[in-house]
Image: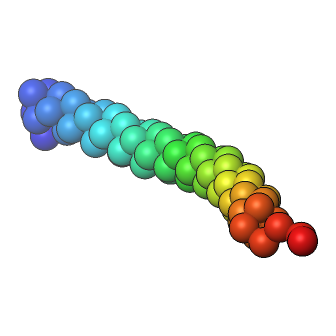
Amino acid sequence: MTDLQTAFYIVGIVFMGLMLLLGLVLVATVVVIRIKIVAIHRHIEEKFGQVINWAEKGSAVIEAIKKVTNNPKK
């Protein structure tokens, strides 16, 4: 093999190694970002669940008040 050919092989091996590392880092980054997004989504769903529970309790109170005001005792 000539020196130029050896140099190209070495550059090719280094480039493939760097691209492999870059690909692994990219996959790891996507996984970490996905995990964080899922965690944020769960947190938001929990907060919405709390708000919905409060709204249901409020509507139950309002319905009870309506029943009391519509049917006054004689």
Q: Is residue 42 above or below residue 37?
A: below
Left or right of residue 53: residue 74: right
Give coordinates of residue 12: x percent, y percent.
21, 38
Q: Residue at x 9, y 28 (%)?
A: 4
Q: How many marks?
A: 0
Q: Residue furthest right?
A: 74
Between 28 and 22, the one lying in front of the other is: 28
Q: Is residue 38 above or below residue 22?
A: below
Q: Residue at x 50, y 49 (%)?
A: 34
| Location of the N terminus (image quadrant) | top left
For the question of whether residue 35 can be seen, the reply is no
Between 3 and 10, the one lying in front of the other is: 10
Residue 59 occupies quadrant: bottom right
For the question of whether residue 69 can be seen, the reply is yes
Q: Is residue 13 above or below residue 49?
A: above
Left or right of residue 61: residue 8: left
Give coordinates of residue 60: x percent, y percent.
75, 65
Q: Residue at x 90, y 71 (%)?
A: 74
Give coordinates of residue 19: x percent, y percent.
30, 39
Between 4 and 61, the one lying in front of the other is: 61
Residue 36 occupies quadrant: top right
Q: Residue furthest front?
A: 74
Left or right of residue 19: residue 2: left
- The colouring scheme, among rainbow, by chain, secondary structure or one colour, is rainbow
Between 65 and 26, the one lying in front of the other is: 65
Give coordinates of residue 68: x percent, y percent.
81, 66
Q: Residue at x 26, y 35 (%)?
A: 15
